[in-house]
Amino acid sequence: APSALHQRAGVLPAQPLRAARRGQPNHPWPTSRAQGPAIKMAASNSWPAIEAFAETCSGVGSFGYGSGWEARVEDFFRHVSLETLLDHLRSASEAGDLARVDTASEVLKHVLHAQVAARELAQGDFVPQLEQGLAHYSAKVRALTARQLRHIGLASFRPEQRLALVGALAASLHDAETGIAIDAAEALVALARSEPAASRSTVLDVLREQLSVEPALAARADPSIALLRVLETTTRVCARDEEALSEAQSAGLIQPLLDIVSGDDILLQLNALRLVPILAATSRGLQVLTSSNLVDHLSRLAGLAGPGAGPDPFLGDEALRVMSQLSARTLAEGAQSTSEELATMFLQAMAQRLAETQRAVQAVPALELIGAFAGAQPPASLKRITGFGNGSILNPWMRFAASHGDKITVAGLSSIAAALRGGANFGDGPEEASPALLHRSADDNEFAALLEESRVAPAPEEREAAAQLGHDLFVAFGAALNDRMRKAPESANVGASDTVVLVAELLKQPFDEQQCAAYALLRTVAAQDAPWGLRALFDAGTEFEAALVDRTLAMSKQAKEWRFGVLEAVFRNPHRDAVLGPNRLEQLKAFLRRGPYLGPAAGPAPQVMVEGGSGA
C-alpha cells in the first residue's frame, strides 16, 4: 500500500503518460517481448553490411574514435542509412530477436558518435523512434536512446518535436535503470536552462505530471525513488533561477520535498535533505526555506532544540550539513537576524563538538561540515569560521585536519579542499582548453557535486578578501602539518609552497584514498581564482613538479585521474601564462593531450617542467 507521503504527493497508479498525452504511436516498439511468429526483417539485404560494421565497432578502443571516424561512418551510411538502421532495430524488436537488437544497438551507439549521424538524428523526423526507444523492453536500447538525447540536447530539435521528447524523458525518470534516469534528468535540466524561457516551463509542466502518473515502462523503479528523481531534477532546474523556482512552487513541485524532510521515512529524508541546499542558491529559494518550519525541524534533528536535546542518530549529521549551507547563504543575503541566528547556532554546535572530541577519528563528520560551511559563501563564511570564539573552531579544525590516520587524514584534506572551493574557478578558462583536453578528470562525490550547484562565487569587490582568506587557511593547515611531521622547526614561517611540499609527502604513502584526497586538495589550490594557488604549486620545488608529470609512478587509475585533474586545473587557470611561462605551458599541453593513463612514450624521457623558479 502506498505511504501517506506518496498519497500526498500523488504518486499513485494512473493512466500512462504517453497514452494520456499523445495516443499510441503509429509504429510502436513493444514494451515487452513480442510473442508469436517473427515479423519480416526490414531491408534484409542491408543486414550483412550492419554486421560487418559491428565488427569494425568492436575494434574501437576506449581512448576515442580518432580523426577518421567521421569518414568511416559516412562511408557506412552510403550503404545503410540511419533510417534503415533504425528500421532493423524496430523489426528485430518486434520479432523478439535479441541478438539482432544487440547488434543494431551496438552499431547505433558507435555511429552516433559521429557528427553526421547526430545531426541527421536531430534534423530528421525520428521523434517516434526515439520515444519508442525510451520505452523499449531492452535496457540497452533505452540506455542508448537516453544517452544520445543527452548528448545531442533537446534544444537541437524543432520546437514542435520537443514536447513529445520531454514527456518521454520525464517518464524515464521512473526507469528501474539508474543510468537511464540520470541521462534523462541531465537532458531535461539542460533544456530547462536554455533559452527561451518557454523550454523551462515545458519541463516543469511535465515534471509536475510525473507526480501523478506511473508511465508504462518495461521496468519501473520504486515510486519513492522515482519521486526523489523528479524532485532532484526540479531542484536542479530551479538552482540559481528565481523565475523557475516561482513556477515550480506554483506547480506544487517544492512542497513535496519539504514534506519528505519533515516526514518519517529515514531513507527518503536522507536523500531529500541533500537537495535542500540547491534551493538556497537564490534569495527567493532561501526565503522559501527559512519561512517554512524547515529550520526548526533541522534544529530538532541536529539536537539543537534545547538543553538536553540529542541529535537524531541517523539524520543528525545530515541536518547539520544542511544547516551549514543555509546559514552560510544567509550571511550573503544580509538578513542580519536570520543569518546571525542560523550561523551562530551552527558554529556553536561545531565548537562544542570539537571541544568534546577525544580521538581524532571522531572528528571526521565535524571536519566535513566545517569545510562545507567555509566554502559555501566566501568570503563571509570562511571569515566567520576563522574569527569565531577566539579560534575555538579554527585551531582544533587545523589540528584534527593534520592528524595522522587513514580516515582522519582523508577527511582533513577533503575539508580544506571544500573550504577552498569557495575561491576556486573550475570553469572552462581559456578558449584553447577545449581541443587540448581529450579526457575529463574525476569529480567529487555526488553530494559535493550537488553542493556546487548552490555555491555562490564571491562578488568582484570581495575576490581579494576571499583570496587572502583562502591563502591564510592553506598556510594555517601547512603549519599544523609541519607541527605533526616536524619537517622544520616549530618557529619556522611556513608558506603556501611549503604547505604544498607537506601535502606532497602524503602522496608518497601507499594509500589510494589518501593520494586521491591529496590530489583533490592540490586541484582546488590550482583552480584558485587568484595567482597564489599556481605560485604555491610551482614554487614547491623541482621534485614535486617532476612527480606531477612522471608517468612511471605506481598509482591507481583513480589517483591518475585526480593527478590529471590537478594539471587540468592548472591549464584552465586564467593566471597560468603569467606563472608558468611558455616552456612549461607547452610541456603541460603535451602531457594533457596524452590523457591520464598512458605510460612514457618510446624514446627519450619527457623533460621536467622547470623554468627558473616560479616563472612569475
Image (spheres, rainbow, N blue to C red):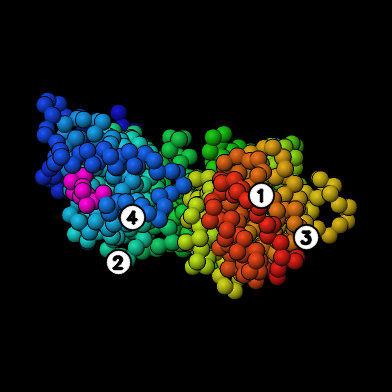
Rounded to the nearest angstrom, the CA distance separating label 4 from label 3 is: 51 Å
Rounded to the nearest angstrom, the CA distance separating label 1 from label 2 is: 48 Å
Viewer-nearest of labels 3 and 1?
Answer: 1
Residue at image x 28%, y 35%? Answer: 102
Q: Which quarter of the figure has residue 61?
A: top left
Residue under pointer 2:
196
Residue under pointer 4:
70
The quadrant of the picture occupied by the C terminus is: bottom right
Residue at image x 14%, y 41%? Answer: 43
- Mark 1 / mark 2, whichever is N-terminal: 2
Tell me the magenta residue range. 76-86
Q: Amino acid at mark 3?
A: Gly
**Total numbered labels:** 4
Residue at image x 70%, y 45%? Answer: 507
Rounded to the nearest angstrom, the CA distance separating label 2 from label 4 is: 32 Å
- Mark 2 / mark 4, whichever is N-terminal: 4
User: Helix, strand or loop at disc 3?
Assistant: loop
